[in-house]
Amino acid sequence: MPTRAARRAQQRELAEQDEEQRQPSDEDQRRRLPWPRILAFGLIVVVILGAGTYMAASVFLGQRGSSTEAGYLPVRLSMAGFDPKVIQAKAGEPVKLDFWNTDNAMHLDGGGVHTFIMDSQKIYVKIPAEARQQYEFTAPATPGDYDFYCNTCCGGKASPTMHGTLHVSA
Ligand SMILES: [Cu+2]
């Protein structure tokens, strides 16, 4: 019969052997595991950077629409038409518009250009792709609703979405 001490020594030896046998497989796992983690980490980085870029771009475009030169009304031009569609003015007084075209050159047939045209006032303004442009003119002396439109995209003058109204009050 082995003594208790001898049995304990044997158990310790067995435990050590177990650990030795386990170690290589642990190392294998360590060698194999990082790859999915690295890929997941990379994916997260890409998603975060993408979201950050998108948000930065939105903020930038948003600023173009809200913070503008004093007295100028931001008017956005896009495939959806004019925003706002109705522009308020006082008869005979200056109308100051801050156009910003949110489409890029790849977007439209005419190289991304939108136009602001008022036949009644002989106004023709061309706003290049992804550009901002201030324009000032004098409102008609006669109160009423005056049509304006864009003729470079989406059916142009024939398309109702490409029209807007200058509402002139006395
Ligand atoms: Cu247009």
Image (cartoon, rainbow, N blue to C red):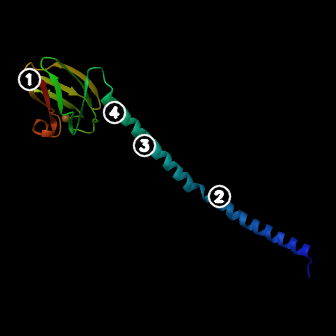
Q: Residues within 10 Å of mark 1 (few under 14, many from 20)?
A: some
Q: Amino acid at mark 1?
A: Pro
Query: Which of the two marks, 1 or 4, is nearer to us in this view?
Result: 1
Q: Earlier in the sequence, mark 4 or mark 2?
A: 2
- C-alpha separation, residue under disc 1 versus residue under disc 2: 79 Å
Q: Which mark is residue 62?
A: 4
Q: Amino acid at mark 4?
A: Gly
Quadrant where ligand 1 appears: top left
- C-alpha separation, residue under disc 1 versus residue under disc 4: 32 Å
Query: Which of the two marks, 3 or 4, is nearer to us in this view?
Result: 4
Q: Residues within 10 Å of mark 4 (few under 14, many from 20)?
A: few
* Front-lying residue, 97 or 79: 97
Local secondary structure at mark 2: helix
For disc 1, the marked residue is: 143
Q: Earlier in the sequence, mark 1 or mark 3?
A: 3
- C-alpha separation, residue under disc 3 versus residue under disc 2: 32 Å
Q: Amino acid at mark 3?
A: Ala
- Tell me the residue at 26%/20% (across/down): 71
Q: In the picture shown, does residue 74 fall above or below 41?
A: above
For disc 3, the marked residue is: 51
Q: Is mark 2 within 8 Å of ligand 1?
A: no
Q: Residue 19, position in %: x, y?
A: 76, 66
- Tell me the residue at 79%/69% (across/down): 15
Q: Amino acid at mark 2?
A: Arg
